Image (spheres, grey):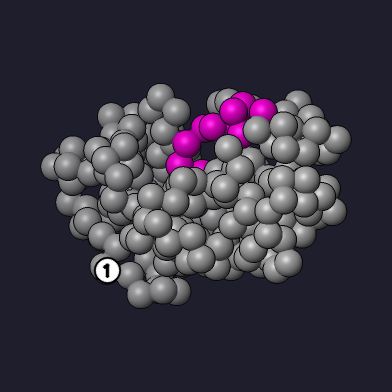
Amino acid sequence: MAGLHLEQFHCGDNLAYLLYGNKEAVAIDGVAWEEISRFLAGHGLSLTYVTNTHGHFDHTAGNENLLRHSRALYLDHNAFPDGGTIEIEEGAIRVYRTPGHTEDSMCFHVGGVLMNSDAQSARGALLTGDTLFNGTVGNCFSGNLPAFFRSLRRLMALPANTLIYAGHDYVRDSLALAKDLEPDNPDIDRFRQTYDPGHVYSTMAEELKINPYLRFNEPAIVALLREHDLPCATEEERWLSLMSID
């Protein structure tokens, strides 16, 4: 299989996605349903599935209209075992159960997303919803912080060149907070200079350099926790302490 294409759509600060091949497409968090429908029609694509990274209404609001105007099937979180796949004609989308932001949170991983229609430039991509943003992480509405930590630790193990496509564009605020926590980190400024609000993404390598909630082992972060007299003996303690800082 050659790989899938990815298209990002904006609806306020929400980010919606299509993953598609030559004929079939999957909508994920399709709140920008009108733009998605026009894109499908303009590219001769059939919407096969509609699904979501989690059940919050700002991500599911487009489902009803997408389903009404297509023959697509809706797949909710109960349809997926951890590590299960969604198959369309040009590739497979793997589903990771990532509880933390919500209990039903999921991320969608594609081993090869085609960049600029070039099969030689296919790269892994991860649609993270509100689990992992570009430069920060989501709120823990589930209340299960240990599960959230385990979910993030799992994502951090993905290849460094994996593209991270989040559920919102919170980049400016995220970088401001990261800079406040780690003012001497030059990578935060470098990422800010490359940020494109028209195409919002990062790589896992960049997240490990700029996202304080993935940098819990870095000396500067450990020193910060000690300054706040917060527990920092283990990785999980350091992450929980970071999440407690206002």
Left of 135 or right of it: where is 64? left
Q: Which residues are magenta?
A: 165-176
- Please check the rendered image and state whether residue 171 is part of the magenta-colored stretch, yes or no: yes
The amino acid sitting under disc 1 is: Ala
Left of 53 or right of it: where is 235? right
Q: Quadrant of the C terminus?
A: top right
Instruction: Give the image location of residue 84, x and y in percent.
Output: 40, 73
- Please check the rendered image and state whether residue 97 is part of the magenta-colored stretch, yes or no: no
Instruction: Give the image location of residue 116, x and y in percent.
Output: 62, 41
Q: Which residue is mark 1?
A: 79
**Which sits in the foreground, 21 or 143?**
143
**Which sits in the foreground, 30 or 25?**
30
Can residue 194 be seen here? The reply is no
Number of residue marks: 1
Residue pictured at 64% horizontal, 63% vertical: 237
Secondary element at tag 1: helix
Instruction: Give the image location of residue 30, x and y in percent.
Output: 33, 41
Left of 69 or right of it: where is 222? right
Residue pictured at 45% horizontal, 74% vertical: 83
Residue pictured at 26% horizontal, 68% vertical: 78
Residue pictured at 57% horizontal, 48% vertical: 244
